[in-house]
Structure formats: C-alpha cells, structure tokens
Image (spheres, rainbow, N blue to C red):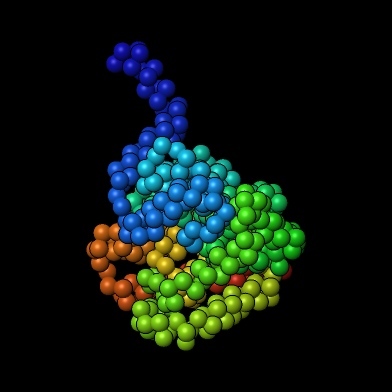
Amino acid sequence: MFSFEEKFFEWVRKNILIIAFCAITILGMGIRICGIDFESGDFRDFLNPWWNIIKGMGLEGVSKKVGNYNMPYQTITFLMTLLPWKSIVAYKTLSIIFDFVMAMGGMLFVYEVTKSQAKAVVGYALTICSVNVFLNSAFWAQCDSIYVAFIILAIYFLMKDRNEMSFIMLGLSFAFKLQMVFILPVFLFYYVLTKKISVVHFLIILIVDVLMSLPALFLGRNVRDLYSIYVEQTDYGKKIQMNFPNFYAMICDGADKTYYELFKGFSIMLTIAILGFMLAMFIYKQVDLTNKKYFLMTAIWTSFTCIMFLSSMHERYSYLLDILLILFAIVYGELIIPAILSNLISLRGYSFYLFNFNMLEFNHAAIINFGLYLYITYVLVKEILLKDEAQKIESKK
C-alpha cells in the first residue's frame, strides 16, 4: 500500500462519524426522492384540493378556513403556492425538511444522555432511515415529523434545564398538530413531581400557538378558529378508532358509528383514570423524574396510553411512540424488541393505506399492540416504581 493510501484510510478512520453522517443524509434524501411523485389518497382527496383553493384565493387563502389544519400550516401552504413548484413536491419537501430536523433533534438528545458521538449518529441514522418516517413524508405527504420534531427538541431542552425553551418547542408542536397532547401528560407528571416548572410554563404553549397564528389573524381569520379547528378534529369521522389497532379494535367494529357515540366519553374518562392512577403511584413512591431514563420511559408509557385508550386514533398516531422507542433503545439498549414490534405494527397501517396490502389482520394487530402496551406498563412499574422502592430500602440499611 502506498503512503497516500495509508494517509487516506487514516483520514477515513479519524473522520468516520462525519463520513457516516453525510452518507446517511445522502441515503435518506435518495430514499425520499424515490417516493416524491407517489400520490396517496389523502393527497388526491384533501391536500391537493386545499392547495388549489388556497392558491386561487391569494391572501384570502390565509384569512379563510381551508381544510382542517391549523393556521400556521395553512399559512405555510399559502407561501409555498407562491413558489414555482407542484403541490406534491412542496408538501413533501416541507415534511422531508422536518424529517431531518427531527433526526437531528434525536441525535442531540442521544448525545445529551450518553455523551457518545457514535450512538448519536446511530440515533440520527435509525430515525432518518425509519421506514415509517420516510413513508409518512415522502410517500403519504403527511407532516407528522413537524410536530414530533418539536416534541423531541422539547424533551432535549428539558433535559438541559432550559424549561422555557422546552415549552416554546411544545407550543410550536401544538401550533401544527393537536397530537402534541400525547406528550403533555409526562410534562404534567414532571410538573407535579419535580417542582422545577410552574403552571406558567404551560401557558407558554398557548401563547406560542397564538403568535404562530398572528399572520392569519391579522388578515382577518376568525379568532374562534384558534380552538374550533382542534375541537372539530376530535369529532372528525365519528369513529371510535380510525385504523389504529388499539383497545377498541379488540372489542367492537370501529366502522360502526354507534360505538363512537357509546364510547367517546368513556374513552376520555378511562384515559384520564389510567394516567391519574399512575401519577398517584409516582407521587406515593416519590419517583425522581429528573432521572433521564425514568422521564423517557414515562414519556413512552403516557403517549402509548393516550393512543391506546382515546377515541378516533388514526394509524399514523403512533408516530411519536415509535420515535421515542427507537431513541430509548439506542440510549439504554433496552426495549429493543418492543421498538421493533411497535414500528412493525405502524408499518402495517402504512402498507394497508398506501399500497392496499394487508400484512396482518387488524384484530390480530390490535391484540399484539395491546399486549405490547401491557408489557411496557410492566417494565415501567418494575423499573421505576419497584426498583426505585428497592433502592430506597437499600439506602436506609
């Protein structure tokens, strides 16, 4: 081997993580370009018609309600109509950008906890190359990476004790998607148990939402839309579950609207009861949620509880859960099998909706998913409530 070859390979060895990061980024972009022209049903039936209406209205496309997305996303859609792009390219480009923002947020979080550059790059790689992530943005033209990116950054800033910035990120997340509420319970747990934040921090979420909506409000958008959009979303479809294999998929026909009227109120009460019972146990056991592992494990459980027991859950609503499980598996080397299973169950929903392929019967997926929820609940109780109690007893000896 010549000396220049030795120098080259030595340079590669010293810069392997940077090279890997760049290679993964190129690979991630390449995968997404492959799906850029694919038209999903949501794009044909909703997103593209909304685009045409907003484009035809000009500035009124900001001041009038079009579709069922919140004001900031509609405002960005209007701005994108000013570009010489096809609607499908514009929608997907926005979501793809936030795929990478989310992946980099995950990388920052992994490094903050582990201080390992290698694990941080692995976190970036597994997030950006997740099948569900690129199917969501580059194929489906959905924008779940936007609200989840801000949630991951909110958790990152909370771990760094930058509480105001954390809640600003939650506010940005809420401004784009109501599904931000899936992570809210763990922040409530943190508020009660640590006393490191106050109720004022939660008001930041609403303030940021209003600030993000100001362009639309200044142009004449009805102030009532600040809350009515999300209220209407909770009632959209009037089905107890909307293709997400949760608790209700095991006990009734989700397509029958009768069960929506029967179980909607029950679903809210049941979710609050389960979360409330666990919070009471955390208070009784004096769980330390400043512990990063405890916080992330609790975040996984609370978000899983919301999508398992609330009504009208779509197949995409496990997006946040899947990302949190991936990051937890990388950081702690635990819950690897649950992370794989959760992502596979989500993949079942994507393949069925996008490609009309049923890789697993829906009721079977629901049983597996509920079993996965019970297992994660067991791990939470064992690792936090029981282990923490054992450590306190040991420390008293």
Which of the 4 quarters of the picture holds residue 291? bottom right
The residue lying furthest to the top in this view is 3
Residue drawn at the location 45% of the way across and 47% of the way down = 55
Quadrant housing the N terminus = top left
- Across and down, in percent, residue 185 comes to 61, 67
Residue drawn at the location 55% of the way across and 78% of the way down = 268
Q: Which sits in the foreground, 15 or 56? A: 56
Q: Is residue 90 above or below residue 171?
A: above
Q: Is residue 214 above or below residue 338?
A: above
Residue 385 seen in the current view: yes
Q: How many marks?
A: 0
Q: Is residue 285 above or below residue 31?
A: below
Q: Which sits in the foreground, 86 or 142? A: 86
Which of the 4 quarters of the picture holds residue 136? bottom left
* Horizontal relation, residue 92 to residue 357: left or right: right
Residue drawn at the location 50% of the way across and 68% of the way down = 233
- Across and down, in percent, residue 130 comes to 38, 51
* Horizontal relation, residue 305 to residue 141: left or right: right
- Across and down, in percent, residue 377 comes to 50, 72
Residue 166 seen in the current view: no
Quadrant housing the C terminus = bottom right
Q: Which sits in the foreground, 36 or 108? A: 36
Q: Which sits in the foreground, 320 or 221? A: 221
- Across and down, in percent, residue 84 comes to 41, 37
Residue drawn at the location 69% of the way across and 70% of the way down = 286
